[in-house]
Amino acid sequence: MATATAKKPATKKYAYEARDASGKIRKDEMEAVSEAAVASRLRERGYTVLSVKDATAKGLNTEITIPGLGDRIGLKDIAIMSRQLATMISAGLSLLRAMTILTEQTENKALQKVLAEVRGDVETGKAFSVALGRHPKVFPPIMINMVRAGEIGGFLDQVLVSIAENFEKEVALRGKIKSAMTYPVVVFVLAILATAAMLIFIVPVFAEMFTNLGGELPFATQLLVSLSDFITVAAIPIAIGLVAFGWWWKKNKHRQGIRDKVEPIYLKLPVFGNLIKKIGVARFTRNFSAMVRAGVPILQALDIVGQASGNVVIERAARDVQDSVRRGDSLAGPLTEHPVFPPMVVQMIAVGEDTGALDTMLDKIADFYDEEVESTTEQLTSLIEPLMIAVLGSIIGGMVIALYLPMFNIFDLIE
């Protein structure tokens, strides 16, 4: 009687990503019966498993990513992550367990990969702030320094809540700015497209008709025809130039020389300058308050909040305050020399400094300017809507009138 041989389990090839004992990330493939078997073997070797995937699942199952259109890690993602992490740590979960849960439930693939690396660093014994600091493009300096202060002081959960609240307010502030700017930008782009279309496609037809009829054109019509001739020839070079300038600006807008020249001009713009100033003050005071409350040293906090303010004018003011603190002088004194900070802000900071409630006073200033930004954006939106409609109507209407002015003399030209 033939003896039946036990059928050997089928193996598959799996691609894995793991961190070795020295902290180096290793990527390779391994044949095994399951993902769990691969993870088990890697742990036996002393590796920290980051990911295990079926290497044979390709073709239609392959994830397609387009450069620039993949998952991006935004401030809102970091705020949600901080809030969830604070909740789990407050509930008594260990940091490592909380990071594992957070990594598994995060929907953003890019953030999930970063959190897996952070969890791996924490698992190998690195401090949480050090693990975050290995990803400076994802986690802002303010978060890294506040987490470090929370680790030292033993109140990491409170710091994470403060980070979440701070980032949530920043996200709300950005949302208000976007909502205020969306309508005028869309109308402006439509105005440019409509004007360009008329100059390139419609005006030349009328110009040829006027030329065939003969006679002298009105000045407005001559000007429009000349502009049409110029745009028809220069449209492609202008488009290429705008694209090239956009690419150059994206690459160089953060250079110090560019910032020193451009950003002070932002504060002097007739309509938006006051709004930009309020946004900068709100951002500066909110970040400064969060860092002071977390126990970050004043000099270090000033350096970070100055850079995070988004304007070189406020950054210079923060440096002046740093110099004043080093000399043993007050925080508020140097701010009087910078017009970007209104007298009310300077006085409230001085009172907070004298009473030992600087973080509370900074919070009140930030809340006040958040409301001011919201009020200003609403006013700008209500003002810009009719203004942009009037501008668009004037441009299109003026072009139509210029085209039809010669029609008054058309019968004389025909005769």
Image (cartoon, rainbow, N blue to C red):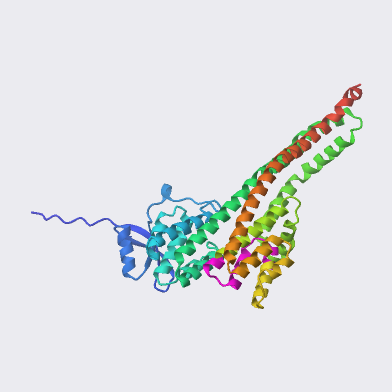
Question: Is residue 196 among the parts visible in the rendering?
Answer: no
Provide the residue span drawn in magenta: 291-316
173 above or below 220? below
Question: Is residue 39 among the parts visible in the rendering?
Answer: yes
Residue 279 lies, in percent from the top left, at 65, 56
373 above or below 304? above
Query: Is residue 230 left or right of 365 when viewed as pictured?
Result: right
Q: Identify the image quadrant of the N terminus.
A: bottom left
Residue 161 lies, in percent from the top left, at 48, 60
Query: Is residue 233 left or right of 314 when viewed as pictured?
Result: right
Front-most of residues 220 and 134? 134
Residue 13 lies, in percent from the top left, at 34, 58
Is 198 part of what is drawn in magenta? no
6 above or below 23? above
Is 302 part of what is drawn in magenta? yes
Front-most of residues 375 and 28? 375
Farthest-out residue, bottom? 327
Farthest-out residue, front? 355
Residue 207 lies, in percent from the top left, at 83, 33
403 above or below 294? above
Q: For the image shown, how many numbered marks are present on the structure?
A: 0
Residue appearing at x 72%, y 56% in the figure:
266
Q: Identify the image quadrant of the C terminus.
A: top right
Front-most of residues 322 and 137? 322
Residue appearing at x 60%, y 56% in the figure:
367
